[in-house]
Image: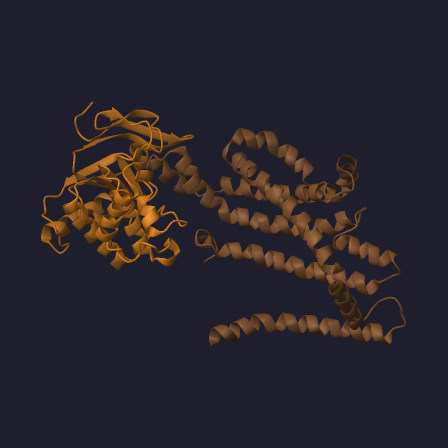
Chain colours: A orange, B brown
Amino acid sequence: MSDKQIAVEGVSKSFGHLPVVENVGFEVADGEFVAIVGPSGCGKSTLLNLIAGFERADRGTIGIDGVAVSGPSRNGIMISQQGSVFPWLTVRDNVMFGLSGASHVERTERANRYIRMVGLSGFEQAYPHELSGGMLKRVELARALVVKPEILYMDEPFSALDALMSLRMQMELRRILDEERHTVLLITHDVEEAIHLADRILVLSPRPARIQAVFEIELPHPRKLSHPEAQRLREVLLKELGL
Amino acid sequence: MARMESRLGRIVPPVVLIALLIGIWWIVVARGDNAIFPTPGQVATGAWALAQDGTLWEHIEASLFRVEIGFGLALLVAVPLGLWMGWVSSAFHTLNPLFQMLRPISPIAWIPVAILWFGVGDFSPIFLIFLSSVFPMMVQTTVGVRTIDRRYLRAAANFGVSRWVLFRRVVIPAVLPEIIVGMRIGLGVAWLVVVAAEMIALNSGLGYLIIDSRNAGNRYDLVIASMIIIGVIGLLLDGATRLLEQLDTVKWRYVR
């Protein structure tokens, strides 16, 4: 198996007679940020679920750090569009959910540190129904980061937010990734989000999903979408997606 | 200010409606020639007399005691069983047909069996109350587990928590709102059944009071008084269970 952190090889998946993912292969290096864009319904979420271990591939192999994936693991935390912050726990209890071992005091301190990092200080005791959509995303991010996963799987994490909040969260994510090194696999239909964040962009075909094109982005962070290179890339990507 | 107005708006109309109905009742009985059916005034006087000599409280206490025990036992059985049936498919498929068959049998139908098994003490009504409230609570709990949003279970799986943590921090709190709904239904039926159960061969409780008042010289004032007291206590019991909906850990289910 490859020495890359994520190695996907010849992976296919069907639901009944419907092929959803077809012969997809790619690798992601440690600390790399890879965005996967594709038309809606193309099977990108399924692909991510396969890699994160929530679904089994019909064919092909998926390896994380050289070990075949056999199920979900706390080494790779999924952040999805609908979110999964537990509504019955306070912000702090949500963030502490995945923490085990250590003393209660230590765990609380660690949770508080990450709550601060995502900008939610003062809301430790709040319940999710008292928070806005953007704040919920921050809770989810803190809950994922606090267990120090090597990989973050993000399935259209900010697409339920309004445009402004989505952009703000993208910038926050970038800032956090400068502080803490994580490998990120981001699924999105938002071309600009991908250009803004990723080191590399994979474009998927309409269903069944295959890799149609790959783009490396060399621009330094923080990126401006008005940059000529970003603009050119945007045009090319939209063309790949048939627009 | 606006809040007080809205509270008043919620209290005034039902009070007016009930007052109106009592007024109509009074007029109809006063103008009719039925000597047995009492006026609201006679009902109030009768109830007052019973309250004064203390027997009314004894009857209420007896009924509440039976409901407490029967409902409490039902809750202890229904919640674990419901959680188990909701979580383990084979348990559901094995037990559900049996329970669905037992469920539609009216507790009243069990009265002869209850007398045979438990005699005419407190155990018979407690058994009937248990039977009547255990099924709704169990069904509600089972449904609650089976409809837990999958994304929460997936998140728990993602963090690799132990089964114990999964159950304590995800499954139970996710189902708690359903359990509370089940408790409201269960307590409602329990109260409904205690009266029916007490009509059979006991010498205390509000159900006994109704039958005894009727048999001991057509005291219809006391019959109606008991009925109204039963209604009011039912309302209070439901209100008390609804207080559980204010718990911080279940509020999420009732907001928005």
Q: Is residue A121 left or right of residue A175?
A: right
Question: In the image, what residue occupies the spot 33% across and 36% down?
Answer: B158
Would you say residue B191 is visible in this rendering? yes
Give how far across and how far down residue A12 sits, in percent: 32, 28
Would you say residue A187 is visible in this rendering? no
Which of B194/A192 is in front?
A: B194
Q: Is residue B245 left or right of residue A104?
A: right
Q: Is residue A70 left or right of residue A214?
A: right
Q: Is residue A165 left or right of residue B1?
A: left
Question: In the image, what residue occupies the spot 21% across and 46% down?
Answer: A194
Which of A165/B227 is in front?
A: B227
The N terminus of chain A, quarter of image: top left
| Quadrant hosting residue B78 | top right
Give how far across and how far down residue A55 sits, in percent: 36, 32
| Quadrant hosting residue B49 | bottom right
Give how far across and how far down residue B107 sits, in percent: 73, 43
Query: Extreme top residue here?
Result: A1
